[in-house]
Image (cartoon, grey):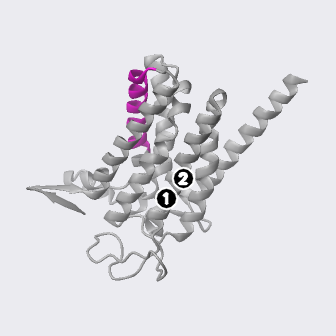
Amino acid sequence: MGFQVGSFTIPYYGFFIMLGVAAAAVVGWILIHFFHKEYDDFITLAGCVALGGLIGAKILYLAVSWKKIDFSRITDTEYLSAWLSGGFVFYGGLIGGLAGVFLCWKIFHIQVMEYASVGIPCIPIVHAFGRMGCSAAGCCYGIPYTGAGAITYTESLIAPNGTPLFPVQMTEAVCNLIIAAVLIIYIYRNRNKVRNSLLLYLMLYAPVRFVLEHFRYDDKERGIILELSTSQWISILVFAGAFLYYIIRKRKKITKSL
């Protein structure tokens, strides 16, 4: 789904992602200059993160959707193109993005943690706009719901048409923008502890994602294991890992101060 500009059709999802990237670039520019960092290095890092994120998001999407793939048609160019062009899973993008950070450090020898920690708010900003795109396109749709803010699609190729649905995409978009605001305030007020921003982001987003997964209705597209979606299991691991790392590091600091 998209809108027409002359003879061109611009997909809603791609359009909102572009808006998100533009908004994140502005925020990143402000934060990088506030901390007197090199913006060129930040752009290089952002490019590596974006590339790794796209690859990771696609790989995880294919992994959770493998049962629906007709491997006998995998050599069909149109069929393969349809699978490669549509569908992404955020946590795969997050993992791929972190891999991009590592490769950027190895290849370009940039002090990536100094930039990544400052630029963390850019992730939920882009993600928020991506969820707005999901809402416009009808993917990642919510459960049947007739309360305030319900969305009813009439021409969606993905979501059920004519059924009021919970606005889970826009709810997550708002949550992501709130998380971005919290991160920006944290970074501004804790200039000497900006490296904690990644841990803070993970511990804020994981519970939000876990809860909102219960309000989604596209179970077949997400993969379900023991009544929990793939993203819910990853949310548990992400939160537990981030929290455990925080506790261990805090105890080490206390031990050193004794």
- Residue at 49% across, 58% down: 174
Q: Quadrant of the N terminus?
A: bottom left
Q: Is residue 49 a member of the stretch shown in magenta?
A: yes
How far from the left and from the top, in percent, is residue 91? Answer: 51, 49
Q: Which of 112 and 236 is in front in this view?
A: 112
How far from the left and from the top, in percent, is residue 185? Answer: 59, 41
Residue numbers of the magenta segment: 38-56
Q: Quadrant of the C terminus?
A: top right
Please say if 87 is above or below 36: below
Q: Is residue 241 a member of the stretch shown in magenta?
A: no
How far from the left and from the top, in percent, is residue 123? Answer: 47, 43
Q: Residue 174 carries which label?
A: 1
Please say if 55 is above or below 154: above
Type of amino acid at the residue the image marks with label 1: Val
Q: What element carries label 2?
A: helix
Residue that protrudes farthest toward the left in the picture: 7
Q: In this view, does 219 lie to the left or right of 246?
A: left
Tell me whether circle 2 and circle 1 mark residues in contact (CB < 8 Å): yes
